[in-house]
Image: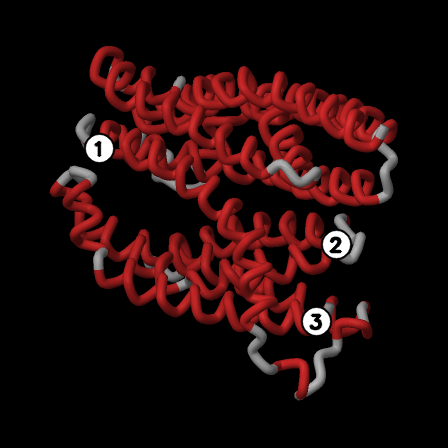
Amino acid sequence: MRQFVANCVWLAAAFSVVMTVIVAALCRNILTWMKTPADIFEDAYIYILIIFLGIPATYLYNMLSGIIRSMGDSKTPLFFLTLSSFLNIGLDLLCIINFQMGVAGAAVATVVSQLISGILCLFYMVKKFEILHITKEEWKINLSHMRVLCGMGIPMGLQYSITAIGSVILQTAVNTLGSLAVASVTAGNKVGMFFCCAFDAMGSTMATYGGQNVGAKKLDRLGQGLKSCILLGVIYSLIAFAVLFAFGENLASLFVDSGEKQLLYNARLLLIVSSSFYIPLALVNIIRFMIQGMGFSTFAILAGVFEMIARTLAGLVLVPKFGFIGACFASPLAWVFADAFLIPAYIHVRRKLQKMMG
């Protein structure tokens, strides 16, 4: 196990350095390809450059939280993820309002909060799991271990990459609506991302849960766990909708000037529309990650394809035809598309495993 962890660290370090160099060098080209409005181009460049330079921090947290979950501890990564979200908001306010750093402050806050969460995961892992204390001999690069890790990791990465393609096409369409629409989506998404952390945690938990129970051949527990997690997701979704419906504009005002009435109205509209579909989002995360944990990563990738198709349709059809409100329905449409595939896929996977295991 320690050798796999060591090789995972080497892979993460290599990928993070390569990705940071490539995307940081292409920042301006990316913004140009995405038709970023001229009046916010430089601010957007500064923001994504800092975010891209912070890729190693993202790798650090994702890798270590994944290792901790693989040890059967799903609560601690959730705690650190929640802490990171609160820390991000606090640093946003500190950097933007107190230090007057503007968009650079927002980017720095994001990177620093992820870095702190990653470091906390590292300290916790070293203290809690003595079995993971890697010796000098175990740090040697093992190509066979790396092939196994890439075999598991590349499908997951491909899944996110496919989904991201649709998001890029959608963002390009939003950019054509002007800087007000871009700022509205950014402010709304900033708040929405915080509320969606719970769905990410549910998904990660179910991936571990699915893998453990398939490995133990306890298929009857899969359905029980799925029902419990879905119930939790539904309850949380309703609470999140109520909070965003009542306080969405106030929360968005934390990140923009309270005098920007139209911007705040748009951000609240985005939050209300998206949170109305949080139950489908909960299903996407819970079922997709569970299927992935059960060993059927191809279905998780295909779900990403459905999300990409939905966001592409939104970017090419809904946004040009309906404007900002079309952008508001883009993610909900993607979640519904993914669910339409994932629910039958889970039923198929469950039946297939039952036949295989008798």
Callout 1, which amino acid? Asn
Mark 2–mark 1 CB contact (< 8 Å): no
Query: Residue 260 location in percent, x, y?
Result: 31, 31
User: Is 80 or 98 nearer to us in this picture?
Assistant: 80
Coloring applied to the structure? secondary structure
Name the residue located 65 percent from the left edge and 68 percent from the top edge: 5
Q: Are marks 1 and 3 in contact (CB under 8 Å)?
A: no
Q: Position of residue 226 (x, y in %)?
A: 76, 27
Q: Which residue is mark 2?
A: 76
Quadrant of the snapshot with the C terminus: top right
Q: Is residue 112 toward the left or the right of residue 48 in the image? A: right
Q: Which amino acid type is marked by label 3? A: Phe
Up-down relation of residue 66 to residue 331 (above or below): below
Q: Please say whether residue 98 is visible from this viewpoint.
A: yes
Task: Please state if 39 lies on the left or on the right of 59 as rendered.
Answer: left
Mark 2: which amino acid? Thr
Q: Residue at x 66, y 40 (%)?
A: 295
Q: Position of residue 210 (x, y in %)?
A: 75, 38
Q: Give the residue displayed 40% in from the left and 18% down from the top.
A: 329
Q: Which residue is mark 1?
A: 175
| Front-most of residues 358 and 206 | 358
From the image, tell me which residue sits under label 3: 123
Which type of secondary structure does the marked residue at label 3 adopt? helix
Label 2 secondary element: helix
